C-alpha cells in the first residue's frame, strides 16, 4: 500500500518534470528562433543602410567626376563603385541564406527579398548606364545637355525611385526587427510565468504529497521506533501492534517474530548460564579446596623443614662440645674417651633420625612425624641429656645440676623424640641464661605421672608473651633483643612431640629472673607391653 502511494508520487513527479522539461525546451527553441529572426532583420537593416550610404557616395563621386576630371576623380569613382557592389553582394548573400518561407505572421518572404534585391541591382545597372550617357555628352562638349540629363536622373531616378525603394526596405526591416523583439519579449515573459506557475504547482504537489506520506508513515515509524527502544532496553516481551495492511505491518510482524525468537534464545542462554555458573562454582570450590590442601601441605612441609633445620643445630653443638672437651684433656683415661665417643655416637644417631625423617617426608609428601614407640627409662634419658647440657653450658660458664630418683622411671615413648624435647628446652636455657648462671634439672614422680622441670636464671619471659611462646615463629620481645639467631620453632615442635606422647608442657617465668619449663608424662609398669598411647 505504501509502496503504491510512493510509486504514484514518483510517477506523477516524473511526468510533471518531463512535461515541464518539454515545455521549457519548446519555449527555448521559440526564443532562439525569434532571436535569430531579430538578428537577421537587424543584419539586413545594416546591409540596407550600408547600401544606401555606398550608393549615395558613389552617386556623388560620379557627379563630382563630371565636374572635375583627372586620375584622382576616376580613382574615387572606381573605389566607391567597388564598395557599392560589395554592399550589394552582402545584401544578396543575406537574402539567399534566409529561409525560403517563414509561415509565421510576421515571417520573412524569401522571393520578395530576392525581388527587392533584383530591383536594387537593376537600378544600379541602369544608373551606371545613365551616368555613362551623361559622361558621353560631356565628352562631346554638350555640357548643358549633360547637366540637364544628370539633374533629371538625380531628381527622377535617385530621389524619385531609389530613395523610396531604399527607405521602404529599411523601414520593412526595422519593422520586422521590432516585431521579432516584441515576440521575443512575449516569449520570455511567457517562459517566466510558465516557470513561476510550474514552481507553484511543484511546491503545492510536493507539499501535499509530503504531508500525505508523512501522515501515512508517522504512526508506523513511531511504533517501530518505540518497539526497537523497548527491545534495546531488554524488554523482549514487548510487541508492536499496527492495524494496517501495508509494508509497515509486514515489518512489524517480522519484528515481533524476531523479538520472540530473541526471548526464546535469551531463555536458553539464561538456563545455560545457570548450569555453567553452577559447574563453575563446583569447579571453583573444588579448586579452592585443592588449593587450600596444597597450601596446607606446603605450609606443613615448610614448617617441618624449618623444624628439622632448627633441631639439627642442637646435636651438632653438643657433638662439637664433646669433641672439644675431649681434645682439651691431655691425660684422660680410656673410659672417658669411650664415654665421649658414645655421646657423639648417640647424637649422630639423633642427627641420622632427623635426616631419615626429612627424606621420608620428602618422598611421601607429608609432614607427619614418625614415632618408634618403646618402653624407656626416663631417669636415664634425662641424665644423658643433662650431660649434654653441661657441654653446651661450658661456653658461658653456666653450671647444670640434676635432681632425679635413683630407681628407673618407666614411660612409653620415642626415645629420640623425647631427647629432642629435652635438647630444645636445654638449648633455650643455655642460650638465654646469663653467664655464670645455673640450670637446675629435676625429675619427680607424682602418682601416675613423671615430670621433668628445667629452671634457669636467664632473661625470663614477659607476662604478656607467656601465652604465645608455643606459637610458631614467635619470640618474646626480650629474646629478640638478647639474640638474633632464633627462629621461634623449638617450643612449638616440643609441644607437638609431647602432645603425641600424651603429656603437656607448661612454663612459669619472671622477666629478668628466669624461667621454669615442666614436661609431664604418664608412667607405665614394665610388665604392660601392650600399652597404647592415644
Image (cartoon, helix red, strand yellow):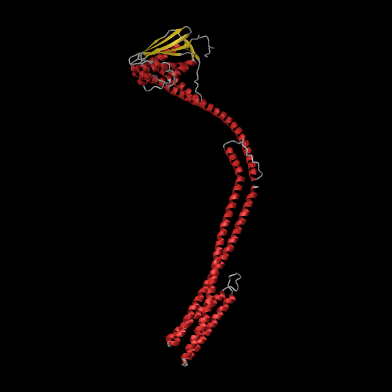
Identify the image quadrant of residue 119: bottom right
Q: Is residue 5 above or below residue 60?
A: above
Q: Position of residue 262 (x, y in %)?
A: 61, 38
Q: Position of residue 80 (x, y in %)?
A: 47, 81
Residue at 59% x, 59% y: name it. Answer: 21
Q: Position of residue 138 (x, y in %)?
A: 47, 90
Foreground residue, 458 or 314? 458
User: Residue extending furthest right?
Assistant: 245
Identify the image quadrant of residue 380: top left
Q: Is residue 213 left or right of residue 488?
A: right
Q: Position of residue 330 (x, y in %)?
A: 33, 17
Tell me, yes or no, if residue 329 can be seen here.
Answer: no
Q: Is residue 24 above or below residue 148?
A: above
Q: Is residue 418 above or below residue 255?
A: above
Foreground residue, 53 or 395? 53
Identify the image quadrant of residue 393: top left
Foreground residue, 296 or 8? 8
Q: Is residue 198 left or right of residue 357?
A: right
Q: Is residue 319 above or below residue 87?
A: above
Tell me, yes or no, if residue 195 can be seen here.
Answer: yes
How many numbered discs sit on the rendered protein?
Answer: 0
User: Residue extending furthest bottom?
Assistant: 140
Foreground residue, 214 or 69? 69
Amino acid at each position: 500500500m505504501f509502496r503504491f502511494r510512493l510509486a504514484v508520487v514518483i510517477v506523477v513527479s516524473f511526468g510533471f518534470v518531463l512535461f515541464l522539461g518539454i515545455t521549457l525546451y519548446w519555449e527555448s527553441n521559440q526564443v532562439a528562433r525569434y532571436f535569430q529572426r531579430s538578428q537577421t532583420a537587424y543584419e539586413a537593416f545594416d546591409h540596407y543602410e550600408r547600401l544606401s550610404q555606398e550608393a549615395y557616395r558613389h552617386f556623388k563621386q560620379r557627379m563630382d567626376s563630371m565636374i572635375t576630371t583627372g586620375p584622382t576623380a576616376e580613382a574615387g569613382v572606381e573605389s566607391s563603385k567597388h564598395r557599392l557592389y560589395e554592399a550589394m553582394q552582402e545584401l544578396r548573400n543575406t537574402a539567399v541564406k534566409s529561409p525560403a518561407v517563414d509561415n509565421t505572421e510576421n515571417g520573412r518572404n524569401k522571393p520578395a527579398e530576392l525581388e527587392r534585391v533584383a530591383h536594387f541591382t537593376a537600378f544600379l545597372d541602369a544608373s551606371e548606364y545613365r551616368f555613362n550617357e551623361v559622361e558621353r555628352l560631356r565628352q562631346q562638349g554638350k555640357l548643358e545637355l549633360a547637366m540637364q540629363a544628370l539633374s533629371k536622373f538625380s531628381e527622377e531616378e535617385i530621389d524619385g525611385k531609389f530613395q523610396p525603394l531604399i527607405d521602404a526596405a529599411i523601414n520593412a526591416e526595422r519593422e520586422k526587427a521590432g516585431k521579432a523583439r516584441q515576440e521575443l519579449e512575449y516569449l520570455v515573459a511567457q517562459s517566466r510565468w510558465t516557470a513561476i506557475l510550474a514552481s507553484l504547482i511543484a511546491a503545492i504537489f510536493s507539499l501535499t504529497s509530503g504531508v500525505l506520506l508523512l501522515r501515512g508513515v508517522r504512526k508506523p515509524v513511531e511504533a517501530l521506533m518505540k518497539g526497537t527502544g523497548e527491545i534495546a532496553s531488554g524488554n523482549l516481551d514487548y510487541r508492536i501492534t499496527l492495524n494496517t495492511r501495508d509494508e509497515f505491518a509486514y515489518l512489524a510482524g517480522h519484528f515481533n517474530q524476531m523479538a520472540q525468537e530473541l526471548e526464546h534464545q535469551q531463555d536458553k542462554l539464561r538456563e545455560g548460564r545457570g548450569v555453567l555458573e553452577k559447574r563453575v562454582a563446583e569447579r571453583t570450590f573444588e579448586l579452592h579446596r585443592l588449593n587450600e590442601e596444597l597450601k596446607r601441605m606446603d605450609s606443613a612441609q615448610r614448617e617441618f623443614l624449618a623444624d628439622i633445620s632448627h633441631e639439627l643445630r642442637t646435636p651438632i653443638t653438643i657433638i662439637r662440645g664433646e669433641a672439644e672437651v675431649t681434645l682439651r684433656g691431655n691425660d684422660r683415661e680410656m673410659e672417658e674417651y669411650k664415654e665421649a665417643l658414645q655421646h657423639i655416637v648417640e647424637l649422630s644417631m639423633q642427627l641420622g633420625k632427623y635426616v631419615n625423617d626429612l627424606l621420608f617426608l620428602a618422598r611421601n609428601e607429608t609432614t607427619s612425624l614418625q614415632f618408634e614407640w618403646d618402653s624407656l627409662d626416663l631417669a636415664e634419658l634425662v641424665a644423658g641429656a643433662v650431660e649434654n647440657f653441661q657441654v653446651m653450658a661450658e661456653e658461658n660458664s653456666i653450671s647444670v645440676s640434676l635432681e632425679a630418683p635413683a630407681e628407673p622411671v618407666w614411660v612409653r615413648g620415642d626415645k629420640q623424640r623425647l631427647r629432642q624435647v629435652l635438647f630444645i628446652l636445654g638449648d633455650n636455657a643455655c642460650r638465654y641464661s646469663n653467664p655464670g648462671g645455673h640450670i637446675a634439672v629435676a625429675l619427680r614422680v607424682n602418682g601416675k605421672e613423671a615430670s621433668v622441670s628445667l629452671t634457669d636464671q636467664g632473661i625470663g619471659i614477659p607476662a604478656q608473651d607467656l601465652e604465645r611462646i608455643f606459637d610458631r615463629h614467635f619470640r618474646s620481645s626480650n629474646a629478640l633483643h638478647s639474640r638474633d639467631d632464633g627462629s621461634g620453632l623449638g617450643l612449638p615442635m616440643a609441644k607437638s612431640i609431647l602432645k603425641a606422647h600424651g603429656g603437656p608442657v607448661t612454663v612459669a617465668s619472671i622477666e629478668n629472673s628466669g624461667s621454669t619449663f615442666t614436661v609431664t608424662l604418664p608412667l607405665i609398669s614394665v610388665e604392660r607391653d601392650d600399652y597404647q598411647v592415644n
